[in-house]
Image: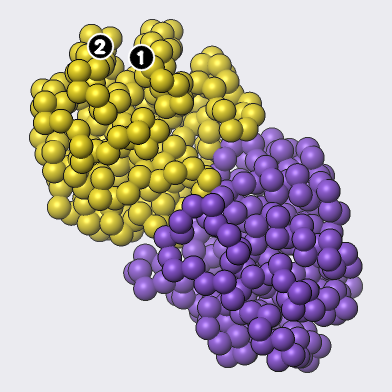
Amino acid sequence: MIDAYAYIGFWPYWPIKVRKTADLIKLMDKWSIDKAVVSSTRSIFTPNVEDGNQEVYEAVKEFPDRLIGCAVVDLGNEESALKQIDRALESGMRGIRLYPLYHGYSLRKVSPRVFNKLIESSLPVIVPYRIIMNWGLPRLQPEEIEFLLKSLSDIDVVICAGNYGELAPTLELLRKNDNAYFETSCLQVWGGVEYLAKTVGADRTLLGIGVPLQYPACGITKVQHADISDKERELILSDNAKRIFKV
Amino acid sequence: MIIDAHAHLGAWSKEEFFPVATADWLASYLDLMGFDKLIASSLLAIFYDFHEGNLAVVEATRRYKGRILGYVTVTTSRFLDEAIKEVEEMVTKYGMVGVKIYSTPLYHPVPMPWPEVYYLHIDEPWMYRIVEKAAELEVPVLAHATPEDCLNVAKAVPDATIIMAHMGNTQIARGDWNKAIMVAESCKNIILDTCSSTVDMGFVERAVERLGAERIVFGSDVPLFDPWCQLEKVKSAEIDEEDKRLILGENIARILRLEE
């Protein structure tokens, strides 16, 4: 089982129990999560994204069989974005995560050079609607993601942290863009995973949990109880993530 | 014993991914989950015609007696005397066990994704009269409202039992379960309900630690949410088994005096 949407780092809004990477691994053990795709919360909340990316690099180095590292890149400044993508490649990151709301830019204003660089990197791009499913946190507009998909049609784009309000527009994006995927950590709709499998296909849906910020059991149970075939469940729980993140 | 203290009869939205919760659907849901009972309010009553919706709930409670229980709903205090009469009749004549109020706050710090309507606000003098009626009838009020609004109502009507729906985990409350716990700490007649989109790890544990498990009830908000996910918030929380039993059913049974 792979959590395609996980974090390391401090959580500034309220105390959380799991604050160290070693404790995250213990939490994953408890819930039989084999691997987690992580970026650092430091890269979201502090000015220099590289500080958090360095934490991810070190965490992956310490737990190479358990963590899949993603670099957070601030696409708002062309020159620094190009350098950040280079560093992500050099440090062996398996994906690029974007938080335009927190870094103060619009995906519509990103320079073509930066998009071309992302395409050249071949790394999957992860774009969350929100950090986690807490209504107090800001939400990215689907139109921003639509623009991103149009600009990155040659690489995989994982759309994360969508709930019922985002489901219809995201399904539309998945129908129009073969390179788009839906991650389930924030989807709380009755039968949501079945609906995704039926409408866009299990091969376009990834298990996400949001450890250690969200309850692992909540993320896992909706896939385990979904009325889908074993093959579809396997795709969602791990096979799609293995393919996209080249595990 | 598991009792779902927050369910709905009817349809949420035009989107095809939301099931329509008929009485039969709700009974099937109880069977699927192995739950004993649920308490439902009508979505038609919340968003349109409260009397028509409430009667549909009455019909469901009669059809599945003892398994489906009902909340009477009034859409706004502006129906003042009619609304108070509705609450009284639905409880005394038709056996409803609580009052559901779906409240819109007077101020949103961020723009909401739907047109804002201010006629459903719980924290206003006429609504206090409805809450007083619930207190007089000794039934709880399930309030979809912000922690601040619940606090004002709970203080204004200290004899009422206010169940804060979603523990502040709503768009209108900005997902602030921390504030919900703070408010409940300061006002003993506030109970917190667990259902919501939010699955922030540790929020159930934090509520139990600060308030005690006796002040928390389990709800699913079906047919909106995946009930397995809602159930796991409580089942997987790092709290005592006794606390889980209280949250999952014993507390709401005590509040509704179901054992009597």
Q: Is residue B86 above or below residue A113?
A: below
Q: Amino acid at mark 1?
A: Glu
Applied colour scheme:
by chain
Chain purple in the figure, letter: B
Chain yellow in the figure, letter: A
Image x and y of residue A107, in percent: 24, 38
The chain under label 1 reads A
Label 1 SS? helix
Q: Is residue A230 visible?
A: no
Disc 2/disc 1 C-alpha distance (Å): 9 Å
Left or right: B151 with respect to A69? Answer: right
- On residue A87, the disc is 2
Q: Is residue A190 above or below residue A50?
A: below
Mark 1 nearby-residue class (10 Å; few <14, some 14–19, many ≥20)? many
Pick the residue in front: B39 or B51: B51
**Residue at 22%, 56% in the rendered image:** A172
Q: Is residue A213 above or below residue A200?
A: above
**Residue at 24%, 17% in the rendered image:** A80
State the residue position of label 1.
Answer: A50
**Residue at 30%, 42% in the rendered image:** A159
Q: Is residue B137 visible?
A: yes
Image x and y of residue B92, in percent: 81, 88
Q: Are marks 2 and 1 in contact (CB under 8 Å)?
A: yes
**Residue at 66%, 53% in the rendered image:** B167
